[in-house]
Amino acid sequence: MKAGANRIEAVVTDIITVNELVKRFHFRRTDGGLLPTFSGGAHIVVEMRDEERTRLNPYSLMSSPLDTRDYTISVRRDDAGRGGSLFMHSRVEPGQRMVISSPVNLFSLDLRARKHLMIAGGIGITPFLAQTAQLAAEGGNFELHYCFRNDGVGSYADFLRQRYDRKVNLYRSDLQETFELERVLATQPLGTHLYVCGPEGMIDWVRATAAGLGWPGETVHYEHFAAPQPGKPFDVTLALSGIDIRVGEHESLLEAIEAAGIDPPYLCRGGVCGQCETNVISHDGKFLHNDHWLSEEDRRSGCKIMPCVSRFEGRSLVLER
């Protein structure tokens, strides 16, 4: 755990199978003390030491901000991913010591809002578990719409419905239950803020529909951590450090930079916070931009890259680091 994130020595106290794809992990401090406070929407970065490799993956905190004896995350298994979720599902056991970061919140509630409208898809439900607990304790006004494929992967759907009753609306695609997004957005009272977390396509749909209905941009909040994608290995020169590195097929550019002994800043490691933005000095090839931070102008210029999630294909790449 490096720049921008404080290390916490933690122990895995419990692992619970939620459904066929999701497991819940509980962490406590190894010294028995309270964990740092956080607000709904925060995430932590979990360090996974996999033989010679170290992965650092972000996960939303789903536990109540009112109780910091314990941090809880849910991890969806991705059999086609780079191995982080498979490591958590197959290699982590209760009693195991791990390193986690202090919480960072890039998806916080705007407490000036008169109402909070929440839209979740799949595992994107996790930050809303913490946010609804926070709002319920404070008497906040919220409405949650949760879309998922079937009952087998509807993580925490029954829990949410039982706890919050009519504030929670569930939609199962296998039952052809349709979420009427435009109607929901068009009937909200003034002062409502919108929050969406889930697959990229869902986030784009919600944001575009809200914009089309005239929702001000500052009232629309979203979170989607892009996972680093595997790809062809490529070579990079780090100009200020004076070293050459090779980025492996299943390694992110950020991980390769860190493996070379350099500590670049980060907060999310998912292409949304902008902390690891890096200037490109020269390149001969094409960028594979996978982030949610750079503007289209920045991408076209070829002058910037987000090393946490983006890749490169070509003959040469020189970065400012």
Image: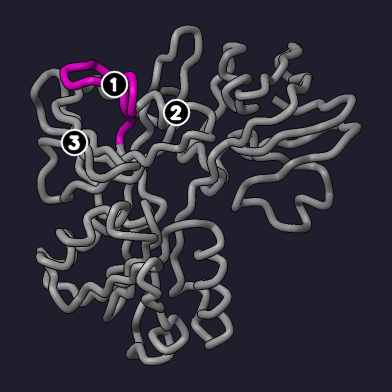
Neighbourhood count class around disc 1 (C-alpha, 10 Å): few under 14, some 14–19, many 20 upward: some
Q: Nearer the viewer, residue 137 or 63?
A: 63
Q: Look at the picture and state if 112 lies above or below 123.
A: below
User: What residue type is disc 2 on?
Assistant: Gly
Q: Secondary structure at mark 1?
A: loop
* Image: magenta residue range: 89-102
x, y (%) of residue 64?
16, 50
User: CB of mark 3 within 8 Å of CB of mark 1?
Assistant: no
Residue at image position (61%, 51%) is 293
Q: Look at the picture and state if 258 lies above or below 200.
A: above
Residue that carries the numbered disc 1 in the rendered image: 92
56 falls in the magenta region: no
Residue that carries the numbered disc 2 in the rendered image: 84
Neighbourhood count class around disc 2 (C-alpha, 10 Å): few under 14, some 14–19, many 20 upward: many
x, y (%) of residue 1?
41, 23
Sequence-wise first label, 1 or 2: 2
x, y (%) of residue 193?
37, 75
User: What residue type is disc 1 on?
Assistant: Val
Measure the alpha-carbon separation of dots 1 and 2.
11 Å
94 falls in the magenta region: yes
Q: Secondary structure at mark 2?
A: helix
Residue at image position (39%, 21%) is 48
Residue at image position (22%, 16%) is 96
Q: Secondary structure at mark 3?
A: strand
x, y (%) of residue 314?
86, 30
Residue that carries the numbered disc 3 in the rendered image: 16
Left or right: residue 167 versus residue 210 is left
Residue at image position (26%, 76%) is 143
